[in-house]
Image (tube, rainbow, N blue to C red):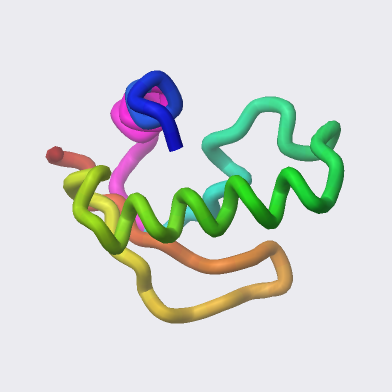
Amino acid sequence: MTEADLSALRRALAARPPGPFHYRDLVADWDALWIGSRVRRGHAFLDAVRAGRLPGVTDTGRKTPQGRLYAWDGQS
């Protein structure tokens, strides 16, 4: 995940209220992406969260039918 990708994600997060979310909620063209791109980008997002590259975002360890659930504290 590039620094430009991370910057776009930080902007999208800043516009959200605190609480749970799915990665797909941050990606405007999610439904237009090929499934392989969704998997690759979702994994890159998980790696970035686990590496602390997106402060304020935590992996809840839970999955829903829409995908992995994350939590945004709304402050970072």
61 lies above or below 54 = below
Q: Which residue is drawn at 57% across and 77% down?
A: 63
Which quadrant would the N terminus be assigned to in this image?
Answer: top left
Q: Is residue 41 rendered to the left or right of residue 12?
A: right
Q: Determine whether, in the image, residue 66 is placed left or right of residue 8.
A: right
55 vs 13: above or below: below
Residue placed most toward the observer, 61 or 35: 35
Q: Tell me where residue 12 appears, x and y as whole percent.
A: 42, 27
Residue positioned 74% across, 44% down in the render: 37
Q: Which residue is drawn at the image coordinates 30% and 28% (left, top)?
A: 14
**x then y, percent, for residue 20:** 41, 59
Task: For residue 15, say whether it is visible.
Answer: no
Q: Which residue lies furthest to the left in this view?
A: 75
* Residue 1 lies in the magenta stretch: no
Taking the image as shown, residue 67 lies to the left or right of residue 5, namely: right
Q: What stretch is highlighted in magenta?
A: 8-19
The quarter of the picture where the C terminus appears is top left
Q: Which of 53 and 23 is in front in this view?
A: 53
Residue under the point 83% across and 51% down: 35
Question: Residue 53 sits in which quadrant?
Answer: top left
